[in-house]
Image (cartoon, rainbow, N blue to C red):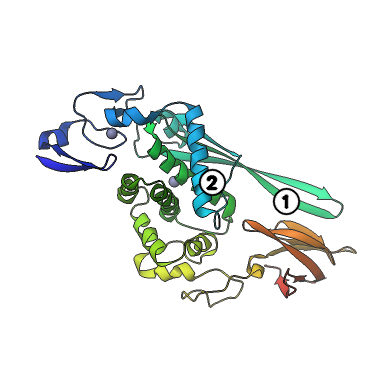
Amino acid sequence: MYAVRDTSHGVEKQICETCLRSRPRCFVCNMPLAGEHGKFKDGRLICQQDLAEAIFSNEDAQKVLEATQTELKRIFWEVLKFPETNVTFELVDRPDLNAAASMAPNFNGLQGLTVSRITTNLTIRGSVTNFHNTYNHRILTMFGMPRARLIAICAHEMTHTWLHEHLSANRKIEQDTIEAFCELVSHRVMQSINQPYEQEVIEANLYSRGQINVLLETDKRYPFTKIVEWMQHGTESRLTDENLHQILAIQTNTEGNSANGVPFKIVYSNRLQLKGITGGNRKLALINNKTLEQGERGNVIVGETNILVKVESIEAGSVTVVLPDGSKEILKLNR
Ligand SMILES: [Zn+2]
Ligand SMILES: [Zn+2]
């Protein structure tokens, strides 16, 4: 007999070697199934214990989404602003989930998926042109999972929605680290709602091919805000055990001194980008999302917030702006 840890239910079970090797397993807790168990029409098998907690309707899934959003807001309100009304949480069967991700129908490594649609709207008011992105996110996962697992998946996918809305196109992060960041947020949620076994599941799964452990370690050593800053503005595409201090290397407009982990003070101006200047009698400067003329004041979107900027002067190839604290910055056109 072997003592096997059943991570989903937090108990040790005695299982003989034959059972361990030959029995089919529950798709939720991965324990060998003996005796009564459930079978879904897409072939997934589930133990009685998980079946008792399983959620099947989109109505119940919507409640899970709302509970997850509440928890995310409570834990991360200072650092991450998650989408609220532009998200849906839908339960499908395994083949449909896999199809949405272009995977083989019987692939069993996928638990959830986020499909985000971005629409860019252009509004022109007088001489001011605004670009505004709107997002719509569909989170898909499988029916028949217990509530705690659904919350864990929902938190993971909600983190993808945040990344879709807040990572600029220039920020390159390798996929394992993206997945690990989503797992870290989910891990925090599981800790907060007291689901230690779901935390263990996250630590042990192969979703991020081990990157989750690097991020959990980073989370112990640095404030969470640093991890978020790194995700948005870091200089490296991957964190490793050896270069955890890279978490402090943040892109700035200053060249050359961001490579060796020197902590930087993040200032607004580093996130203001002059994207274009139009000439003629009436010069206009495009700063981030906003077009402003000389002397004009306007709110410019920076990350999750926006700041009031005044364009003091527009020169050839550069613009002088006044920031909310009265300081001035010269923004140069990137060529
Ligand atoms: Zn189970
Ligand atoms: Zn993911």
* 5 with respect to 328 (left or right): left
Q: Is mark 2 on a helix, strand or loop?
A: helix
Tell me if residue 255 comes above or below residue 80 in the rendering.
below
The residue nearer to you, when weighing 229 against 95, is: 229
Q: What residue do we see at 44% from left, 54% from top?
A: 181
Say if mark 1 contacts mark 2, CB within 8 Å.
no
Q: What residue do we see at 32% from left, 35% from top?
A: 28
Q: Quadrant of the N terminus?
A: top left
Q: What residue do we see at 22% from left, 41% from top?
A: 11
Q: Which amino acid does label 2 sit on?
A: Thr
Give the mark toward the camera: 1 or 2: 2
Neighbours of disc 2 within 10 Å: few (<14), some (14-19), many (20+): many
* 81 with respect to 108 (left or right): right
Point out residue 201 in the picture as x, y percentages from the top left corner: 32, 46
Label 1 to label 2: alpha-carbon separation: 20 Å
The numbered dot on residue 161 is 2
Point out residue 58 in the picture as x, y percentages from the top left corner: 49, 28
Point out residue 225 in the picture as x, y percentages from the top left corner: 51, 62
Q: Is mark 1 on a helix, strand or loop?
A: strand
